[in-house]
């Protein structure tokens, strides 16, 4: 296992001014956090982050990336937190470690092939810092190297994922060596027989052709030196098993038919030397037509540059040649990581990790260009960057990936999981914190939906959501809920109407008369009564045509200031006379009056404009299409219904101790028009635990002001108490309830 000073030395070798303190701190922290944890192999867990860091030192990455490598599993697997890492190492490193934690969750879900595409997109979308991907690739490489201790099933899954996603990604990032190693390691587990066969053949070939590579290297090298390229170096190698296998597959060739199993690389000083070397080689050996590619004048998207050509070489062997400068070689080997080496020349001061440098900005652009894909073999070929810039990728607590359009809320998320989850959603935790349901989700968010059994989605949600699925479901649920409320109300009204007529109401009794009532089915008819579209009396008359209802009468008996009114259903109401009188809230309530509870959001029942509070004597008026409106019996608005007794419904309050709904009441205060009056009034209201819903003022005389206030109170007692307190104020002359 690599020691602390060895790691520091490795970094200092290519970056002499590296921040040693940061490396030491990260080493010690990771060591402490992973403590006694073991890997599947039985090795101490810490050996893994250390190896990952070592791989990245081979790519000569800066010390903050190395620190991230050391810390990369701490949030996921130990007691470490993002906050702690932020504090110790700065937010830059904290964000990178968290990014890796998010990708790690993906490993759990990506076994489903259909999620592979989403995974690719996500990888790109959340990697706004390319260092996350570099560390992830190194992490994956080390895991692949040590895969043998895993179960067969796990090995296969991880290998497939590596082959599908991480190896092509490494290629796209220009890291050919890493790509090849990842491919070969995966190949070994995915297709052991083929791997075995190809490896054996390659081995036989290299035994048969022992010394051939050295021989060609020497011959090529001598030729170049003789022609003036004295510093040229030539390196030959046998191709890797997977790249041989892929060629056999794609060209349907047997191993024996494969011609170019050997590849040679010529490295020279600069670009002019590359073309000179090409000329020398082409003059000396025969060129295989159609194999020449100039990636120097036209670099690949991942910045890869080289000249490719195939010749029939010294031993009549086909030889693939790559010609490049040292600079191009660095990029071909380390890919975008190599840019850091060339662009990060400024010294780093103090403890601060280097800010995202130009090199990384360049790398980010490279990542973005990854998504555009330029050749059929390149992954993401069909995926344009724009395609997923308008998407966000989120997770359920179990790690399931949910793809949503940008701007989506937890409500959209809930409906995307399941309609039931959406319908019963009452709240959401985003990354472990309770957040408002209007929160816009961002990439990588983990969303936990809080549900309730009795919730109906509020119609207002329709305005908040962005997905069609959520919108349609909310509309459907709202319609169903409203219908249910109307039919509940309609049923109660019908029961009472039939009761008073001495008949009994049943759904079956309605069936024969549906046609006459113009209704499709029984439930429609009942809901129509609830909505006020159909009079309960008409239903009664339809079901019992012989029923003689008492004639409806309105008898003024002005002697006590009240009018007696008999409703169509036989109830007698006392309503106040035209001259306003102060009257006690009295009068017997019908024992079978319709119970009224709190009404927040209740379709079917609403209050008149002036409001009513528990304790008020109330009456209901059936409104066409909207159900019942509740009025205090003193409301002058009731006069206009005098001639329509069949719209009157007897209602009563039905609230228990646990009631948590406030009710609106309007009051009018006549007060002295002097500074501080309003402050006094609102002060008294506030200290009485009463809410002010709205308030308006009008100066009626130079020295008096009328203040109209809509108050929200628990009940009549509280309201009366408050009105008394207001009257006691020096500056207040009158306080009256306003009935509309
Ligand atoms: Mn790891």
Image (cartoon, grey):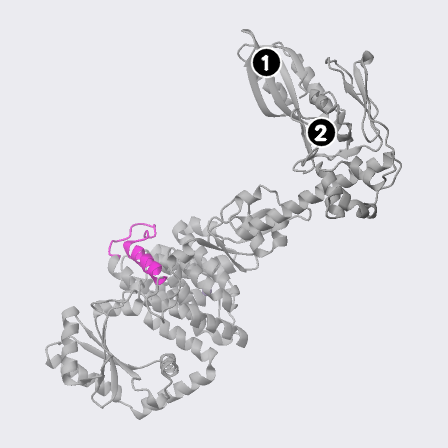
As drawn, is 328 to the left or to the right of 25?
A: left
Labels 1 and 2: the sequence-earlier one = 2
Disc number placed over residue 434 in the picture, else none: none
**In percent of the image, x 47 and y 53: which residue is there?**
405
Residue at image coords 24%, 56%: 345
The residues colored magenta run: 344-371
Would residue 503 be visible to someone looking at this image? Answer: yes
> Is residue 293 rendered to the left or right of residue 624?
left
Q: Does the magenta segment cover residue 361? A: yes
Asked whether 394 or 54 is in front, the reply is: 394
- The residue at the point 44 percent across, 79 percent down is 188
Asked if the residue under mark 2 is in contact with the one under mark 1, i.e. CB atoms within 8 Å, the reply is no
Closer to us: mark 1 or mark 2? 2
Looking at the rendered structure, the secondary structure element under dot 1 is: strand
Disc number for residue 630 = 2
Residue 533, given in percent of the width and then of the height, sits at: 71, 37
Which image quadrant: the N terminus? bottom left
Q: Residue 88, relative to residue 732: is it above or below?
A: below
Left or right, 543 with reference to 607: right
Res 531 → quadrant: top right
Give how far across and how far down residue 48 sits, in percent. Answer: 44, 67
Q: Which mark is residue 706?
A: 1
Q: Most extreme residue toward the right, as rendered?
A: 502
Queried on whether the Cβ of the residue with tag 2 lies below 8 angstroms from ligand 1, the answer reads no
Image quadrant in which you'd find residue 180: bottom left
The answer to which image quadrant residue 610 occupies is top right
Q: Residue furthest top?
A: 702
Foreground: 732 or 498?
498
Q: Secondary structure at mark 2?
A: strand
């Amino acid at each position: 296992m690599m020691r602390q000073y060895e790691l520091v030395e490795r970094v200092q070798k290519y970056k002499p001014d590296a921040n040693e303190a940061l490396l030491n701190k990260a080493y010690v922290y990771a060591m402490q956090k992973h403590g006694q944890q073991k890997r599947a192999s039985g090795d101490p867990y810490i050996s893994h982050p250390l190896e990952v860091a070592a791989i990245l030192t081979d790519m000569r990455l800066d010390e903050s990336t190395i620190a991230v490598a050391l810390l990369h599993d701490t949030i996921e697997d130990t007691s470490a937190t993002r906050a702690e890492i932020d504090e110790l190492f700065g937010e830059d490193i904290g964000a990178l470690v968290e990014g890796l934690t998010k990708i790690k969750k993906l490993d759990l879900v990506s076994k489903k092939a259909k999620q592979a595409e989403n995974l690719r997109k996500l990888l790109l979308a959340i990697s706004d810092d390319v260092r996350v991907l570099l560390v992830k690739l190194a992490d994956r490489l080390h895991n692949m190297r040590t895969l043998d201790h895993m179960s067969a099933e796990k090995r296969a899954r991880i290998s497939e994922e590596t082959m599908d996603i991480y190896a092509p990604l490494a290629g796209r990032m220009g890291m050919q060596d890493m790509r090849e190693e990842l491919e070969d390691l995966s190949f070994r587990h995915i297709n052991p027989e083929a791997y075995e066969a190809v490896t054996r053949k390659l081995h036989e070939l290299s035994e048969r052709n022992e010394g051939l590579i050295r021989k060609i290297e020497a011959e090529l090298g001598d030729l170049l030196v003789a022609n003036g390229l004295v510093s040229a170096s030539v390196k030959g190698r046998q191709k890797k098993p997977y790249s041989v296998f892929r060629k056999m597959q794609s060209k349907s060739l047997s191993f024996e038919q494969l011609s170019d199993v050997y590849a040679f690389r010529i490295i020279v000083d600069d670009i002019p030397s590359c073309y000179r070397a090409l000329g020398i080689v082409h003059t000396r050996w025969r060129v295989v037509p159609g194999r020449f590619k100039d990636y120097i004048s036209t670099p690949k998207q991942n910045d890869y540059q080289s000249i490719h050509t195939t010749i029939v070489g010294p031993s009549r062997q086909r030889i693939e040649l790559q010609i490049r400068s040292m600079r191009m070689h660095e990029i071909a080997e380390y890919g975008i990581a190599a840019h850091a080496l060339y662009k990060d020349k400024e010294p780093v001061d103090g403890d601060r990790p280097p800010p995202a440098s130009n090199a990384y900005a360049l790398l980010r652009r490279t990542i973005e260009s990854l998504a555009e894909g330029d050749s059929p073999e390149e992954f993401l070929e069909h995926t344009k960057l724009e395609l997923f810039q308008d998407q966000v990728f989120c997770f359920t607590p179990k790690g399931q990936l949910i793809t949503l359009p940008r701007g989506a809320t937890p409500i959209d998320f809930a409906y995307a999981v399941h309609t039931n989850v959406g319908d019963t959603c009452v709240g959401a935790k985003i990354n472990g914190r309770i957040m408002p349901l209007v929160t816009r989700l961002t990439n990588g968010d983990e969303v936990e939906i809080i549900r309730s059994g009795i919730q109906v989605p509020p119609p207002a949600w329709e305005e908040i959501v962005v997905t069609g699925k959520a919108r349609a479901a909310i509309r459907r649920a709202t319609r169903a809920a409203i219908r249910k409320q109307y039919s509940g109300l309609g049923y109660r009204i019908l029961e009472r109407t039939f009761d008073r007529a001495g008949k009994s109401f049943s759904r079956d009794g309605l069936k024969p008369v549906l046609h006459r009532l113009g209704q499709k089915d029984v439930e429609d008819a009942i809901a129509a009564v609830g909505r006020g579209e159909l009079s309960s009396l008409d239903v009664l008359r339809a079901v019992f045509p012989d029923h003689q209802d008492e004639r409806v009468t309105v008898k003024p008996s002005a002697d006590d200031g009240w009018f007696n009114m008999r409703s169509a259903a036989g109830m007698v109401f006392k309503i106040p006379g035209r001259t306003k009188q102060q009257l006690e809230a009295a009068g017997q309530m019908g024992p079978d009056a319709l119970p009224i509870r709190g009404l927040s959001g209740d379709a079917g029942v609403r209050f008149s404009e002036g409001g009513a509070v528990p304790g008020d004597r109330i009456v209901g008026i059936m409104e066409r299409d909207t159900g019942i409106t509740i009025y205090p019996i003193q409301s002058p608005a009731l006069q206009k219904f005098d001639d329509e007794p069949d719209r009157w419904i007897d209602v009563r309050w039905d609230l228990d101790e646990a009631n948590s709904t406030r009710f609106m009441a309007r009051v009018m205060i006549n007060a002295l028009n002097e500074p501080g009056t309003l402050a006094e009034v609102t002060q008294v209201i506030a200290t009485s635990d009463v809410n002010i819903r709205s308030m308006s003022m009008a100066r009626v005389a130079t020295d008096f002001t009328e203040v109209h206030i809509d108050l929200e109170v628990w009940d009549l007692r509280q309201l009366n108490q408050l009105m008394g307190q207001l009257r006691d104020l020096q500056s207040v002359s009158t306080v009256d309830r306003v009935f509309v």
